[in-house]
Amino acid sequence: MRRTLYTEDHESFRALAREFVERELAPKFQEYEDAGRIDKSVFAKMGELGLIGLQIPEEFGGGGQTDTFKYNAILTEETARACTSLGSLRVHQDVVTPYILEYATDEQKGRWLPGMANGTLMAAIAMTEPGTGSDLTGIRTRAEKREDGTWVLNGSKTFISGGANADLVLVIARTAAYDPDDRRGGLTIFVVPTDSPGFDVGRDLEKIGIKSQDTVELHFTDLVVQDADILGEPGKAFEYMSHNLAQERLTIAVNAVSTAQAAIRLASDYAQERKSFGQPLSSFQNTKFVLADCSTETAAAQAMLDQALEAHDAGELSPADAARVKLFTTEVQGRVIDRCLQVHGGYGYILEYPIARLYTDARVTRIYGGTSEVMKTIIAKDMGLSARRA
């Protein structure tokens, strides 16, 4: 089905992104997988070409596409098309940058955005803690204000994407005592340079997939933070985090659909080349039917996603609709990639075949950014469904 959301300018950007991915990223991607992170020089090269910092205003060295997410989406589509990824760049660009754009002061923007736009100042966000999972109201990392006006930060975070490569980390910490009547209150966002005394990068967490994305534990021990490094107002972090959830879930959905399409292409090519009982695998009815089902499901997911991309640019994508898009596209991704691996037979289980990497990478999309179960809870609430009280 013909997509209608992209213009000639978008397609020119796509051509630039594709050329960069094929020339700079794909040939070295296995090295980055083995290293557990993308070399930061890649991000600086992308900054020189204008491939990142797309939503950052031109006055700060960005692309000036302040009212659209579509260029970000194209970059994700092109990396997925090549069966690669840009590691933690999506977190830096699609998740963290909007917080700075929305809540930073002019002085803070002047300090942080130029480097974020040119790829020399990478950022991550630290929400999740051991034992809290999706329940951010249970955050225990604390920041206490001292008499001299500074804050002292103590605590630990886990599953932090981009935490090892980051120069700045947005740390969510409790600055007021937990109130059971206001579970979402008392949380504050601190923007912490990673070279701060008391900032410690802990274990590299060994994952079954997305190995090119550094994922670590972080520890803060008597780390001093200035008032000038608080993002927005103290105590408003939960409200701010909710504001950007739609785009965070949308970027996951874009990757889900794009990797499903890549899997179909890999399986189709393999089925036409591979012979079984003297015939191409693609000549068997079962193979045709499996791939036809995959193509149809993915086309449906693409149509839903494109509608969501348009709604997001118009400021009309609700949290519940973002949850619907993430739920549907990631579940489709899981089913499609699994079937495409099955088409490869035993070779699909061998890591030298890209389909194996797509399979392991895909599993986390139904977990991060809110699990599928959390998405269903949000959708059910939007439908007016709630537990009845006796």
Image (cartoon, helix red, strand yellow):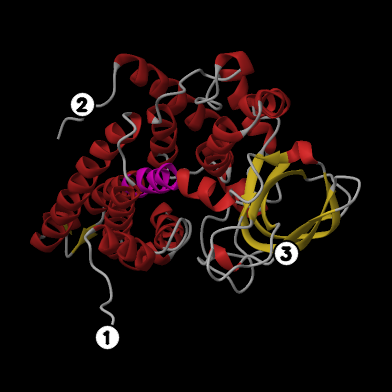
Query: Magenta span has 246?
Result: yes
**Callout 2 environment at 10 Å: few (<14), some (14 to 19), or many (20+)?**
few
Mark 2 falls on what kind of element?
loop
Which amino acid type is shown beneath numbered disc 2? Thr
- Observer-side mark, 2 or 3, equals 3
Instruction: Give the overall secondary structure of the magenta segment.
Output: helix
Above-or-below relation of 222 to 170: below
**Of the image marks 1 and 3, the number of the one nearer the N terminus:** 3
Q: Residue 252, which numbered label?
A: none
Q: Residue 156, which numbered label?
A: 3
Residue at x 25% of width, y 37% of height: 306
Mark 3 falls on what kind of element?
strand
**Callout 1 environment at 10 Å: few (<14), some (14 to 19), or many (20+)?**
few
Residue at x 33% of width, y 66% of height: 377
**Callout 3 environment at 10 Å: few (<14), some (14 to 19), or many (20+)?**
many
Q: Quadrant of residue 165?
A: top right
Which amino acid type is shown beneath numbered disc 3? Ser
**Of the image marks 2 and 3, the number of the one nearer the N terminus:** 2
